[in-house]
Image (cartoon, helix red, strand yellow):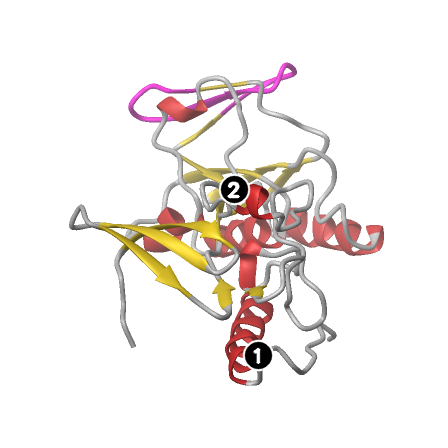
Amino acid sequence: ITALRGEARFKDARSLIVSATDGDEHTVSFDRCLIATGASPAIPPIPGLKDTPYWTSSEALASDAIPMSLAVIGSSAVALELAQAFARLGSHVTILARHTLLYREDPLVGEALTQVFRGEGIEVREHTLAKQIAYDGLEFVLHTGREELRAERLLVAAGRTPNTQGLGLEGMGVALNERGAIRVDRTLRTSVPGIFAAGDCTDLPQFVYVAAAARGNGSRQHGRGGRGRWTCRS
């Protein structure tokens, strides 16, 4: 197995160009290719946000301190898991949800979670957007247009963006969805023969167990010449 460290992009349907970290450029030819580049936190374009030391889920999980107060932007599973975890560890948590909690799921699920969270002392602000964010060195200040919220820490968990930029997929004819995720079929094939994709860079559900199962299956597909099927069912 040869490992190259660097950034890769497709040259054509059977080769990659790798700009290595040592400054060299390599051309790698292949019969089949598996794309598993994952995804990154989606950061909403809220004025002032980029100039503040906000958390994503990575920083929140790596923190060695529990803030007195935490504001959470987002209503996805990751946002809610971390909101409840910090609340149970002692933080005063306020969730700002653009719609309702887990609005893409059955409405009854979101309603039940909202009741549970409020019962645990978590403030849930439904249909609320931060229009401006600032940080004064001690607190985050979030302006919603209706009120001003303050918190020691701010967690942005507004979904994830597939890491597909810069790979040259569009020029190759690899089909992407509206989020930039790679479209795959039940065998993890993309729209280009010989190129497969797995994990959070695809249009499959972005859950750890789905990504793990898909990556494992993608590796087996290579060994089987692309035969076999995989399904995502609970």
Q: Quadrant of residue 112?
A: bottom right
Say which of 39 and 68 sits in front. 39
Element at label 1: helix
Instruction: Measuring from the top left, give residue 225's x and y in whole percent.
Output: 58, 81
Comes first in the chain, label 2 or label 1: 2
Which labelled disc corresponds to residue 93? 2
Give the residue at the far left of this rendering: 22
Q: Name the residue: 50% across, 66% down.
A: 34
Q: Report which residue position mark 1 lands on.
A: 221
Query: Quick check: is 115 in the magenta stretch?
Result: no
Q: Residue at x 66, y 49 (%)?
A: 175
Residues in magenta, as a range: 134-149
Tell whether position 137 is magenta. Answer: yes
Residue 18 location in percent, x, y?
A: 32, 52
Q: Nearer the viewer, residue 134 or 217?
A: 217
Secondary structure beneath label 2: strand
Which quadrant of the figure has residue 16? bottom left
Look at the picture and state if 76 lies above or below 155: below
- Asked if residue 159 shows in the view, the reply is no
**Which residue does the image show at 43% across and 55% down from the upper left?**
89
Q: Position of residue 193 (x, y in %)?
A: 62, 64
